[in-house]
Image (cartoon, rainbow, N blue to C red):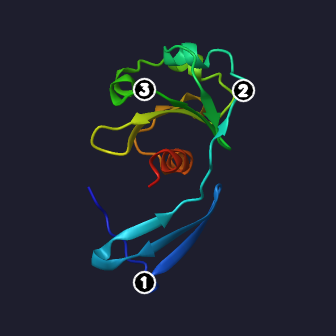
C-alpha cells in the first residue's frame, strides 16, 4: 500500500535531522525519490561478543562492525535464507543489531537484519542497515 501526503512543500529536496544525522530526500523524474543515507563503512572486528555466532547458529567467521551494528558475511544466499537465529541469545549482544549478508543470485547482495536488542527480532526493511551494507558491497562489487 502506498500513501501520498501533500503538505504543500514545493521544493525538489528536503532534509530531515535524524538520530543518524541529516538525511536528504530528492525528487527525481517520474515522481521517483532518492534517499541519501550516510555511509557507515564496516571495520574488521577482532573482539567477538560471547554468544554472537551461537545465536546465529553458525561457525565463527570474519566479523565486521559499524557505528551501531555487527555484520557477518556468509558464503551464499541460501545460507542467509536458512538461518534460524536464537533471538534470546542475540538480544544480549552489545549493539543495536546484527546484519547477515551474502552475494545474491538476482541482486548484488541479500541480507537479514536482527535487532532483538531493540525489541525487533527481524526487520525486513531497514534503511539504516544499508548504511553499513552498501559501503561493504560497493567495495566488493566495485558498483
Residue 7: horizontal and vertical position, in percent?
Answer: 43, 78
Query: What residue is disc 1 on?
Result: 8
Query: What residue is disc 3 on?
Result: 75
**Is 21 located above or below residue 47 in the figure?**
below
Q: Residue at x 57, y 17 (%)?
A: 53
**Is 44 located above or below residue 1 in the figure?**
above
The label nearer to you, 1 versus 2, is 2
- Using the image as rendered, state which of residue 82 and residue 8 is in the foreground: 82
What kind of element bears circle 1?
A: loop
Residue extending farthest bottom: 10
Separation of marks 3 and 1 at Cα, in angstroms? 48 Å
For the N terminus, give its image quadrant.
bottom left
Residue 15: horizontal and vertical position, in percent?
Answer: 56, 72
In the picture provided, is 35 more to the left or to the right than 96? left
Q: Can residue 62 be seen here?
A: yes
First-in-chain label (3 vs 1) = 1
**Is 32 located above or below residue 108 in the figure?**
below
Amino acid at each position: 500500500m502506498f500513501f501520498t501526503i501533500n503538505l504543500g512543500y514545493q521544493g525538489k529536496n528536503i532534509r530531515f535531522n535524524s538520530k543518524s544525522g541529516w538525511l536528504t530526500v530528492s525528487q527525481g523524474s517520474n515522481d521517483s525519490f532518492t534517499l541519501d543515507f550516510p555511509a557507515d563503512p564496516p571495520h574488521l572486528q577482532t573482539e567477538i561478543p560471547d554468544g554472537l555466532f551461537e545465536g546465529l547458529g553458525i561457525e565463527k567467521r570474519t566479523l565486521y562492525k559499524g557505528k551501531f551494528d555487527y555484520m557477518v558475511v556468509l558464503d551464499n544466499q541460501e545460507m542467509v535464507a536458512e538461518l534460524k537465529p536464537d533471538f534470546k541469545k542475540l538480544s544480549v549482544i552489545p549493539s543495536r543489531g546484527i546484519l547477515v549478508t551474502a552475494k545474491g543470485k538476482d541482486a548484488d547482495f541479500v541480507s537479514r537484519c536482527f535487532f532483538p536488542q531493540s525489541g525487533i527480532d527481524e526487520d525486513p526493511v531497514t534503511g539504516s542497515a544499508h548504511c553499513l551494507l552498501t559501503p561493504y558491497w560497493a567495495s566488493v562489487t566495485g558498483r
